[in-house]
Amino acid sequence: MGTLYCNGNIYTLVQEGETVEAVYVEGKTITETGTVQSLLKKYGDQLESTIDLGGATMFPGFVDSHLHIIGHGEKLLRRDLSHFTSAEEMGGFLKSEAEKEYPGNWIIGDGWNENNFLDRKIFHRLELDELVPQHPMLLSRVCRHAFLANSKALELAGITKETENPPGGIIVRDENGEATGYLLDSAADLVKKAVPTVTEEYISNALAASVHDLISLGLTGGHTEDLGYYGGFEKTASAFKEVLNGNSVKFKAHLLVHHSVASDYRQSNFSKNESPYIEFGAMKIFSDGAFGGRTALLSRPYNDAPDISGVAIHQPEELKDLVKKARTLNMAVAVHTIGDLSLEYTLEAIRSHPAVTEERDRIIHAGLVRPDLIEQMKQLPIVIDIQPSFVPSDFPWLIERLGLERIPYALAWKTLLDHGLHCAGGSDAPIEAVNPLEGIYAAVTRRKPDETHEGYQKEEKLTAYQAVELYTKGSAYAINKEHSRGRIEAGFDADFTVLDKDILTGGPELILEAKVLYTIIDNSIQYRAFHR
């Protein structure tokens, strides 16, 4: 028995501008597209239900190609610091939150960004001690590559004046060698180990809250990296299996596997991909940090900090060894790389140990590319995960970091596409807002909604069609699903995102005005904005 979708503006994405009048689906798969009359004539006897779109616009299901699903859920459930525009506001909030907790309980916060403060203030641990004297506290910066800890947290972590910087991390110190509480990249792991382990219930609650939010925003799936952070591989993978069981909720999660738990994954029963809503992907590796904390690894120093060039989380030979490990586990790699030197090291590591499966290697972010690195990427079977919302969030302060000479090669999405490189679109939530319409808007305008200029590096703006492709065909290509997902075509998964407006033919502002009417996964309505 089948379902007919009709009376709407149905974009197939088979080619630009192509629409069909109706779609007929049997089970979880698109059977055929065409006119209502032709499909009724052919399949009328098998028709069980009809979804009248009421003039709405239907796309292949939107998929976020890079986010942290549990982390997004934590942001929904925990203390969100991303909206503060001054250090005073943030400090007052932390003080009031601590007063609600029993003494000794940890205060955990996410998303602070000193670039939103007029004075660009970064709290010192002694200032945090004054605000929160009775609780250990750990606050992650929006990029999640820099953290703030107060004295109680440092004490519980055993960080003293004599503590050496861990590999791939920096304990920022004052002129006397004392830790200031500002921790970069792996240095924060020393404190994270002191934070009480989360419960299975907590992980499941965060995951469930996240997935319900993602579906309400029109997302039918997401590629996520969570498996190395919540008490081990088995504990976290079990939460995904419990929540994404296909009964209470359908959502297609593609799970990257952090290198620290890759062997655990291969030794587990999960490697058999037993759930249709959970699949495991490449081995995730962090090569460097982020521009915001000046930990992205650059080939030349930062323009606004001539003594800093960033942080190599793994030295070149170590990075090669990790890629080699992935190959021995029969896995592709997905490497976080933002700075150009980090990208250079990553490409060399991939060339040294080529892929051993048909699964494609992934470059996550590619924040700064040089022309020579673009040419190198064109010679490799890789996919680039880009995050359009980075542009309005990081400009104009990114110009200060990189300088006018390098800025044309930063977050240069159109350049990558024009060179024939395959790109997929994501949010990196909870670092950025997860709403795919906001990402599409950012790709098209390269500015914030309240700004009126022509866009940061306006020559890098994408068309609305190109932007939508990132979240459909691009995300499918990234996981070798280009023949079953990302288009509305016979034989493809019946995953659809239905909007109340046609975001391909209206102006850019229409993208943000659009509302999700339906999120449909495997021919099953998982979200409905209203009842018809």
Image (tube, rainbow, N blue to C red):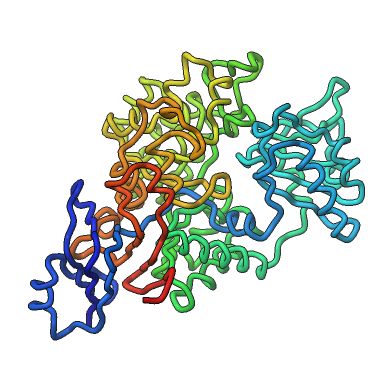
Q: Nearer the viewer, residue 21 or 273?
A: 21
Q: What percent of the width, then of the height, locates residue 467?
A: 34, 43
Q: How many marks?
A: 0
Q: What percent of the width, then of the height, locates residue 423?
A: 35, 40
Q: What percent of the width, then of the height, locates residue 224?
A: 49, 54
Which quadrant of the view contains residue 494? bottom left
Position of residue 316 relative to residue 478, above or below, is above
Quadrant where the N terminus lies? bottom left
Judge from the rendering whether residue 94 lies leftward or rightward of residue 481; answer left or right.
right
Judge from the rendering whether residue 291 lies leftward or rightward of residue 360; answer left or right.
right
Position of residue 171 relative to residue 299, above or below, is below
At x 76%, y 29%, the residue is 172
Q: What percent of the width, then of the height, locates residue 73?
A: 60, 59
Judge from the rendering whether residue 378 lies leftward or rightward of residue 350; answer left or right.
left
At x 46%, y 48%, the residue is 66
Residue 163 seen from this side: yes
Quadrant where the C terminus lies? bottom left
Judge from the rendering whether residue 249 lies leftward or rightward of residue 310; answer left or right.
left
At x 33%, y 36%, the residue is 462
Q: Nearer the viewer, residue 365 or 24?
A: 24
Position of residue 161 relative to residue 68, above or below, is above
At x 20%, y 46%, the residue is 16
Q: Nearer the viewer, residue 280 or 49?
A: 49
Residue 337 seen from this side: no
